[in-house]
Image (spheres, rainbow, N blue to C red):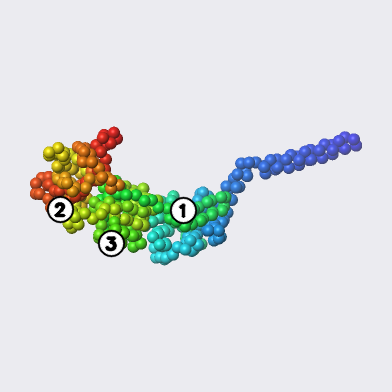
Amino acid sequence: MNNNMKKVSALMALSMALGGGAAYAATLDNTQPVHQTSVSADSKATDAVNVSVNGTSISDGYWNKDGKVAMIPLRDLTEALGIELKWNKENKTAELTRGVLWTQVITGKDQYSVNKMLLTLGTAPEITGGTLYVPASFAEKVLQGQVNTTGNQVTISSEEDVKTVTERGVITRISNQDKYKSIQIGGAGMDGIVLNLNEDTKLISADGKEIALTDLNIGMNVEAEHSQITTRSLPPQTPTYKVTVLDEATESETQLKEVLGTAGTIENVITAEGSISQIEITGTRLTETAPDHIVLNIAKDTLLVNHEGETVKAEELTKGTKVIGFYSPVLTRSLPPIGTAWKVVVEAPAAELEAK
């Protein structure tokens, strides 16, 4: 009898021990940090992204497949920011306009057009549930707003003043195509910057009057107000809001119906009576009919400047100096042809080029 009681007691104790151990093991499993982190990461991808624009909530967004990029509804975003959106059903693109801002969003393509510039944000727009979504960075990089992401909350605020940059330079190229109008300043070829123009871009003469693109010539010094956003291309491109001509019209300039230009380095300098009379330039033509190798006479009224429009001394025209020469199409038939310089822009002295 006593032996049987001992067996029963032993069995009960064993059962309780096993039960307690199982409960203890379950408690450990439920408190494992790794397990909790896994649940949190998995849940983030399925959690809705709460989006607010200028303090007002709009439709929710979501995390993309990687759970790292917040996707937000484009139409709700543009409506909250007062941006007009036109949807093209056939090619699934959205065209956005507001003042000087113009951009195009293409479904499934990580390529965002901003005033003829192309930007990539690392994530393509996508249609989910019949709604087009873009990455939250779109509001900052393209629409120039301020974006703050905390947890599952994306807060967007628009800036009242568009961030702009003002810089000066000499026009080296003018493109007057129907849809793609632009000028290049600050250098030729891969140098400088391309200023994309649209119907809202203001072109102002030195005396404050509005002018047309056809009134601009290569060789003019201008001041441009443009966006901080630029492409990564060479030369970079940027949307432009205002271009002001800095040069006061001179008699020699008004007589020029056509201006030619050559950018390159000075190969030879000729002096007469102690002053520079000619420079020989080899490089790249800026216009169709311009030569890439030319000798330019330096006259008393030839303008010698840098890209800021500041006057430079003739002594800076030394062999090896990087320059841009602007001149009339009246040239000799010699090789190289000879003309008279209207303006010479000193880009980089020979000493600086040798130091590089």
Residue 260 point in image, percent of width and height: 19, 52
| Three-letter amino acid code at the position of disc 1 | Glu
- Answer above or below: position of 310 versus 94: above
3D distance between C-alphas at marks 2 and 3: 23 Å
The residue sitting at the top extreme is 355
Q: Is residue 307 visible?
A: no
- At x 62%, y 43%, the residue is 35
> Callout 3: 10 Å neighbours few (<14), some, many (20+)?
few
Q: Earlier in the sequence, mark 2 or mark 3?
A: 3
Front label number (1 vs 2): 2
Q: Hey, which quadrant is residue 209 in on the image?
A: bottom left
3D distance between C-alphas at marks 1 and 2: 47 Å
Give the residue number, with chain letter if any, for mark 2. Answer: 329
Give the residue number, with chain letter if any, for mark 3. Answer: 212
The residue sitting at the left extreme is 333
Left-right relation of 331 to 33: left
3D distance between C-alphas at marks 1 and 3: 32 Å
> Callout 2: 10 Å neighbours few (<14), some, many (20+)?
some
